[in-house]
Amino acid sequence: MSTVQQLPLELVLEIMLYVFIDAQGKPHKQFQHFSLAWTPYAQRLLFRNIRLHDPMKVYGFLRATLPSSEKDSSTERLGNAVRSLEMTVLSKEMQSLFPYVLRHCPKLHELNILLYSDIGVMTLLQPPKPSTKDMQEFESVSYASIQLPQIQAIRIDVKLDNSVFLSQLFRIWPSIRHLILQGSAFIAVAQSLQNTESTHLVELNLGKGNTRMLAPVFSTLLMKLLNSSLEPIRILDLRGMFRPTVEGIEQAITKFGRQLRSLRLPVFDPNADFRVLQNCTSMEELIIDGYPRENVREYMPLGNIKHFQFLSTSPSIANMANLIKWVGQMPLLAVLTWVTRGDIHKIDVFLNRLRTFCAGRSIQFRHITSAEDLQEELIEPPSFPREQLMTPVWR
């Protein structure tokens, strides 16, 4: 019989993911105590997704992941396990700690940052030797000689009018492939991008509250970002548009529609002409922040859709009948997701109807009570929808 030490690392982590992850997709903090043999694997899972929102938590994280010159250092192994980092830069102290935190995460894939205070680019690239009282124990670390991680996915929410950090984003990380821009981040990043500058974006997501501009201006900046990419645009999320108009996205869908694997749309004028959607011939995922109206249903190619998600809080019998008829024309559909808000008892009849429909066609049905609860892993997946839970550390 094999012991845990004899099993391949990948198999051990898969076992732990399925046995020790709770119903919310989070690891049980106590599961490393089930067996001493499990401890190193449990610690690496616990350190996969890190959230740092105050300085005291940051100092604790820095101690736990201290880079070491010793071969196979346990603290360094924990730093290598970090794949996603969420950090709030609210104070000068958090601003100064940011460059050090990144250098404790050499294999970081995804950065989720909320900016209330701008980050100095020169300090980020060449951090000074730690000199404050709280950083004395890190004075021996040569941070200036440690390179920044090659981050591929960034979520940024900005509460600033101007940000030098955002204007230099692609120069700091030309490796960015997945970009989510919230607050004023869309305007700051798009306006600062030089017309001759190239990126490697495969995903662009416009989060809430960042596009309070007229459609022609929005469209110009959107196209500037999309045109910069040397890679095919695979995932385009426009749900953060302010007062969305088809004119604001027409150019983007016309040029990039055939490349798209996933398209996420806000609620548009029900009378808008959506003929441009006919270009989306490779679409595998369609997400709509509302009920799919006739102008969308008429033109959207359905042959390749594997995941469809919609948001509706008060459907009518007619709307549900039209929806089921339309979804029934998606031959490859594997997952149907309905996002609702408020009292779900009022929609029990419709939930049961969709469950029955999906069961009859071997389609997975998901009911989610708030879209805010969804936190996708920012990768280009082999199939949609993307994972919502913690995924293996070696990915």
Image (spheres, rainbow, N blue to C red):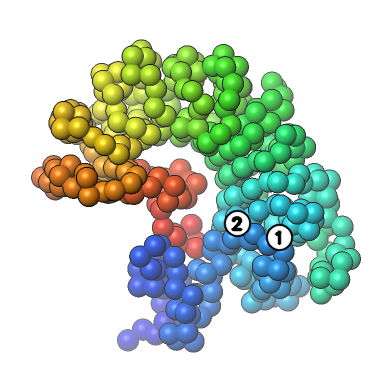
Residue at figure coordinates x 23%, y 35% from the top left: 315
Front residue of this view, candidates 70 and 335: 335
Q: Is residue 172 left or right of residue 82?
A: right
Q: Residue 3: in sight, yes or no? A: yes
Circle 2: is it few (<14), some (14-19), or many (20+) Cα within 10 Å? many
| Residue drawn at point x = 54 percent, y = 63 percent | 48
Residue 85, disc: 2
Mark number, residue 101 = 1
Residue type for callout 2: Leu
Q: Is residue 115 left or right of residue 366?
A: right
Seen in the image, is 141 located left or right of residue 248?
right
Left or right of 221: which side holds 316? left
Q: Position of residue 370 (x, y in %)?
A: 38, 47
Which quadrant of the figure has residue 128?
Answer: bottom right
**Can the viewer see residue 234?**
no
Q: CA distance from mark 1 to mark 2?
A: 9 Å
Find residue 209 and report its horizontal and vertical position in percent.
56, 34
Which amino acid lies under the numbered mark 1 shown in the image of this protein? Val
Could you say where residue 58 lies in the image, as x and y percent from the top left?
Answer: 69, 65
Indicate the position of residue 255 as horizontal and vertical percent values.
Answer: 47, 18
Depicted 218 relative to depicted 39: above or below = above
In the rendered image, which quarter is residue 72 located in? bottom right
Q: Identify the residue at horizontal 81%, vertical 70% (top origin).
A: 134
- Badge 1 crowding class, 10 Å Cα cut-off, few under 14, some 14 to 19, many 20 or more, is many
Residue 9's disc is none
Residue at image location 50% in from the left, 63% down from the top = 393
